[in-house]
Amino acid sequence: MADPRIKTLKIKTGVVKRLTKEKLMYIKETEQQLERVEQLKKSGSDESNIKKQEEVLRESQMMVPDTQRRLKAAYEDLKSTIADCEELKDSEDFLIAENFLAEAEKEIK
C-alpha cells in the first residue's frame, strides 16, 4: 500500500503551486488595471468610470499581500512536510514537491 505521506505531499504541493500562480496572476492583473486607469485618465473618460476602475485596481492590489501571506504559510508547511519525508526522496512526488518549493521560494522573497 502507498505511503499516506505521499498523498499529503501531493496536496501541499498543489496548494503551493496554485498560490504561486495566483500571486503572479494578481500582480499581472494589477499592472493591467493600472494601465487601464491611466489610459482612461488620458482620454478624459467619465469621472465615475475612472473611480470604478480605480476601485477595481485597489481590490487587485489588496489581493497581492494576502496571497503572499498565504503562499508563505503554504511554503513553510510544504517545507516541513518535505523535511518529515526525507526517506521518500527517491519518489517522483518528493522531487516534484522540492521543485515547486524552489519556485515558490523565488516568489516569497
Image (spheres, rainbow, N blue to C red):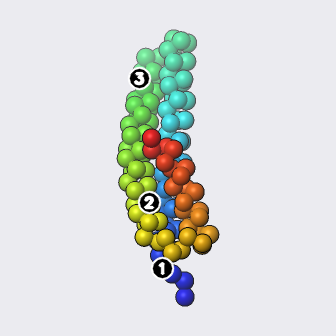
Please identify the quadrant where the N terminus is shown. Answer: bottom right
In the rendered structure, the answer to whether residue 44 lies left or right of residue 54 reads right
Residue 28 shows in the view: yes
Residue 26 image point, x, y percent: 49, 40
Residue 52 image point, x, y percent: 42, 27
Q: Could you say which disc has been placed on residue 79 in the image? A: 2
Residue 18 shows in the view: no
CA separation, marks 1 and 2? 17 Å
Q: Nearer the viewer, residue 30 or 82?
A: 82
Residue 31 image point, x, y percent: 52, 29
Q: Could you say which disc has been placed on residue 26 in the image? A: none
Please identify the quadrant where the C terminus is shown. Answer: top left
Crowding around mark 2 (Cα neighbors within 10 Å: few <14, some 14 to 19, many 20+) is some
User: What residue did someone put label 3 on?
Assistant: 51
Identity of the residue furthest to the right in this view:
92
- Say what amino acid the circle numbered 2 marks: Lys
Nearer to us of marks 2 and 3 is: 2
Dividing the picture into quadrants, the one containing residue 55 is top left
Q: Which residue does the image show at 50% across and 22% down from the upper left?
A: 37
User: What residue did someone put label 1 on?
Assistant: 4
Crowding around mark 1 (Cα neighbors within 10 Å: few <14, some 14 to 19, many 20+) is few
Q: Secondary structure at mark 2?
A: helix
CA separation, marks 1 and 3? 51 Å
Q: Secondary structure at mark 3?
A: helix
Q: Which residue does the image show at 43% across and 17% down from the upper left?
A: 47
- Say what amino acid the circle numbered 3 marks: Lys
